[in-house]
Amino acid sequence: MVSTYGDGEPPDNGRRFYRELQALTKAGGANALSDKPRSEVPDNADPGQSLLSSLSFDVLALGDRSYPKFCQFGADLYTTLAQLGARASAPLQTFDKSQLVNAAANTTQSWQLLVRQRLNSQTQPGLYLLRFTSTQPLPHWRAGDLVAISPENNPEVAARRYSVASVPQSNEMQLIIRQHIDEHSQPGLCSGWLTQDLTLDGTVNMQLQPNPSCHINDAQAPLLLIGAGSGLAGIRGHLSERIHLAKQARQTLQQPPGPVWLIYGERSADLNPLLKAELAGWQQAGMLHQLDYAFSQDPANPCYVQDLVQKNAAQIARFIGSSGHIYVCGRYDGMGSAVDAQLQLALGTATYHHLIEQGCYHRDLY
Ligand SMILES: Cc1cc2nc3c(=O)[nH]c(=O)nc-3n(C[C@H](O)[C@H](O)[C@H](O)COP(=O)(O)OP(=O)(O)OC[C@H]3O[C@@H](n4cnc5c(N)ncnc54)[C@H](O)[C@@H]3O)c2cc1C
């Protein structure tokens, strides 16, 4: 059962598996057994037979039909397994995310909008911080988790997902939403509702979705946070988690959490002063050890977050070492894919793959 990530690629925890499977295909799967150490060769193996001829398989690919390469990894996996001699017992099966919406509808919680605050200037597509409260008992969640929201609370419409920007210790559910504007200047169904039509005190049903691949379980490890635009949501969630852990460590006289470095990008530098002050305050309090901004439409110094990764490559490699964590949040196109390429160059291929395999590279990209 497999998902697809980014531009039709495997998800991070499947990348190594797929790379090795492809290497077998390239090496000539039919003869690959003869290259294996003896201990890995089954006693009854015939070196001439296809490597996976004793395997029968099914692939169920989960995906989102609005992406051009819908379930591409599942399709590639299916073909690769067949090339290696495995026998498919059924055609490739695919499952679109919209089929899941109703099944999940009963686990939602109602949240009331307390505050909506614009984070960027009026000349840019709006980026808003939304703060919600709930009269129901607070659910548990972790930084990196997501919520699914049906536009205008209409369960017939496919839910949109948003990264949570707060931790439960704040007693609030916070989201950071970019107002999507289409080619006819119409606001997106869900982001338009949340950023302009939903009134204060209005309620939103949200379904919490745990996202364990974006949890950071080593509080002592250095943490590099990279994001642009609405990617600030997940970043703020992780920063809040570290701040909470630092407070806890002070109270219990334990070791404080590891250093945090934030690289954040927006189109222009005129961010809401409250946001800048909040980040600067965290930096002064020693919660945020380095803070770098990239403004892509800055007339004097246009710069993207991936440019900062390139510029600081050696420092990033030293900061991360062999066990630091990296979390990247925001759009895949433009930001996520370019940051990924620069990180691979900065860290070197071996460390890059090592970090992925150790679960130290977390990506919340959309
Ligand atoms: C894991 C995840 C986390 C996210 N976190 C955030 C967040 O924290 N903040 C934030 O602002 N947004 C986030 N998003 C994006 C968000 O889910 C919505 O896609 C966005 O708000 C636009 O929805 P809408 O209803 O306003 O626009 P729509 O009315 O859906 O219009 C959006 C336009 O984009 C197209 N479209 C919709 N979905 C997709 C898709 N998946 N791929 C390609 N085209 C598509 C539609 O066809 C339409 O043309 C996240 C998405 C994912 C998958």
Image (tube, helix red, strand yellow):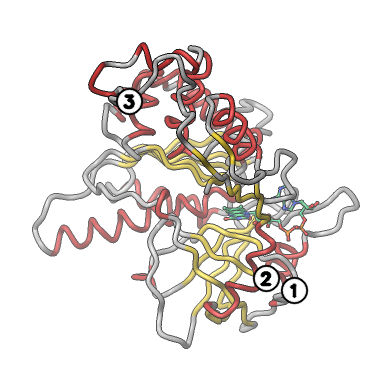
Q: Residues within 10 Å of mark 2 (few under 14, many from 20)?
A: many
The amino acid on which the numbered mark 3 sits, given as a three-letter code, is Asn
Residue in the picture at 73% in, 48% down: 124
Q: Residues within 10 Å of mark 3 (few under 14, many from 20)?
A: few
First-in-chain label (1 vs 3): 3
Disc nearest the viewer among 2 and 1: 1
- Alpha-carbon span between mark 3 and mark 2: 55 Å
Q: Where does residue 144 sit, x and y in percent of width and height?
A: 43, 54
Side of 287 relative to 52 (left or right): left
Q: Nearer the viewer, residue 166 or 163?
A: 163
First-in-chain label (2 vs 1): 2
Q: Where does residue 88 sit, x and y in percent of width and height?
A: 59, 39
Q: Is mark 1 within 8 Å of ligand 1?
A: no
Which label was assigned to residue 201? none
Q: Where does residue 212 sit, x and y in percent of width and height?
A: 40, 54
- Alpha-carbon span between mark 2 and mark 1: 8 Å
- Alpha-carbon span between mark 1 and mark 3: 55 Å
Residue 348 seen by the camera: no
Indicate the secondary structure of the residue bearing disc 2. loop
Asked whether the residues under the numbered discs 2 and 1 touch, taking CB atoms below 8 Å apart as contact, a structural biologist would say yes
Q: Which residue is mark 2?
A: 150
First-in-chain label (3 vs 2): 3
Q: Residues within 10 Å of mark 1 (few under 14, many from 20)?
A: few
Q: Where does residue 284 sit, x and y in percent of width and height?
A: 31, 47
Q: Which residue is mark 1?
A: 156
Disc nearest the viewer among 3 and 2: 3
Q: Nearer the viewer, residue 24 or 213?
A: 24
Which label was assigned to residue 44? 3
Residue 256 vs 319, above or below: the answer is below
The amino acid on which the numbered mark 2 sits, given as a three-letter code, is Ser
